[in-house]
Image (cartoon, rainbow, N blue to C red):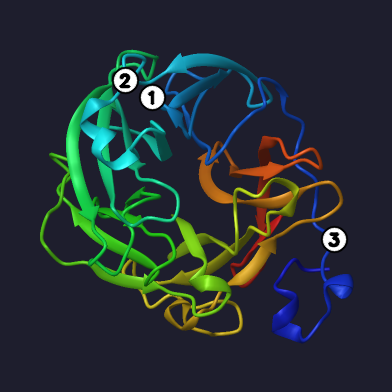
């Protein structure tokens, strides 16, 4: 059965699709807000939420090993946003122009006094990352939350950064490809939710066959086995929208088609990231076990004849 939102067809949860379990992942499997990139020479680098931003490496996308921290000596430039916690959230790693780039956020739980920063590295290894500075920040009067960044490079070479969590939803700004920083002062509005505490966050935009697919997480993270996070998708032929779900509902009106949710012993699968690996489209996310541990989830995406993704 096609893995779409049960609410689209008026189905109950019991009638909805049976989602696949995560693929086999071994070694160091802890992850929260994971992001992954394939190295040009082969192998993978994963980054995740942690003080200094945690790194893992893998040769085969199955067995992962701890690889230190991007910033092992601390990040004093972000301390004003993280208070005593020191965690840097939701990194977004990619390989652009011969080097690794990483957008990441600094905040405290439940606050929109937040900022997104950019760093770069020639190798992606721990301790080789240089901070390039702040990209955008939000305050208690901003009406949005500057966390959960994701860089998308369009086929024509434009750079766009999507971000956002709760408040007024998901935003987007244009970037200058030569600097990775803002190209103008415009903030585009691309998705918003109006129920369950307006819980939408963790945007990731993936281009495929003429469509930009906006993957997001709905509902609540960070509650262990009580987490209700689920992975949603909408799409648009323009990167700035309008994005619509499979039923035609605008993402700015709360639309989103569910493609992965809690099932079996997998709780709160969310904070999605998608990357192309050869002929495969790979979905990376975190989920919780019954014991409340945060784990790395990896699955693949297949696509319907009308261009909608299913997790397998």
- For residue 191, side relative to residue 67 (left or right): left
122 in relation to 22, above or below = above
Query: How many angstroms separate mark 2 from mark 1 (CA)?
Result: 6 Å
The residue sitting at 18% across, 41% down in the picture is: 134
- The residues tagged by marks 1 and 3 sit, at their Cα atoms, a distance apart of 37 Å
Count of numbered circles in the view? 3
**In this picture, residue 66 sits left or right of residue 167:** right
Pointer 2 or 1: first along the chain: 1
**Contact, mark 2 vs mark 3 (Cβ under 8 Å):** no
As displayed, is residue 56 above or below residue 186?
above
Q: Quadrant of the N terminus?
A: bottom right
Q: Which mark is residue 74?
A: 2
Residue 100 shows in the view? yes
| Residue shown at the point (37%, 33%) measured from the top left | 84
As drawn, the label of residue 18 is 3
Measured as percent of width and height from the top left, residue 167 is found at 39, 69
Badge 2 or badge 3: first in the primary sequence: 3
Give the image location of residue 32, x and y in percent: 56, 38
Callout 3 secondary element:
loop
Q: Are marks 2 and 1 in contact (CB under 8 Å)?
A: yes
């Amino acid at each position: 059965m096609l893995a779409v939102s049960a609410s689209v067809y008026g189905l109950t949860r019991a009638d909805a699709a049976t989602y696949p379990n995560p693929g086999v992942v071994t070694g160091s499997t802890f992850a929260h807000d994971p992001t992954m990139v394939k190295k040009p020479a082969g192998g993978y680098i994963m980054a995740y939420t942690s003080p200094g931003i945690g790194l893992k490496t893998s040769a085969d996308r199955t067995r992962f090993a701890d690889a230190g921290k991007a910033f092992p000596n601390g990040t004093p430039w972000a301390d004003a946003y993280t208070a005593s916690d020191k965690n840097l959230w939701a990194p977004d790693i990619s390989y652009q122009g011969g080097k690794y780039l990483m957008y990441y956020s600094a905040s405290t739980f439940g606050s929109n006094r937040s900022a997104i920063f950019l760093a770069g590295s020639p190798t992606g290894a721990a301790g080789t990352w240089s901070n390039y500075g702040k990209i955008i920040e939000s305050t208690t009067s901003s009406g949005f939350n500057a966390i959960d960044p994701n860089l998308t490079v369009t086929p024509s070479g434009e750079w766009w950064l999507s971000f956002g969590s709760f408040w007024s939803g998901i935003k987007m700004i244009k970037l200058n490809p030569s600097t990775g920083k803002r190209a103008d002062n415009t903030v585009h509005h691309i998705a918003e939710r109006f129920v369950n505490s307006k819980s939408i966050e963790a945007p990731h935009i993936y281009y495929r066959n003429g469509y930009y697919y906006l993957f997001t997480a709905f509902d609540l993270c960070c509650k262990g086995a009580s987490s209700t996070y689920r992975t949603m998708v909408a799409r648009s032929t323009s990167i700035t929208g309008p994005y619509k779900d499979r039923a035609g509902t605008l993402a700015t009106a709360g639309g989103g088609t569910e493609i992965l949710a809690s099932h079996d012993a997998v709780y709160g699968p969310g904070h999605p990231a998608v990357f192309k690996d050869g002929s495969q489209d790979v979905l990376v996310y975190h989920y919780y076990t019954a014991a409340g541990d945060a784990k790395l989830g990896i699955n693949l995406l297949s696509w319907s004849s009308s261009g909608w993704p299913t997790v397998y």
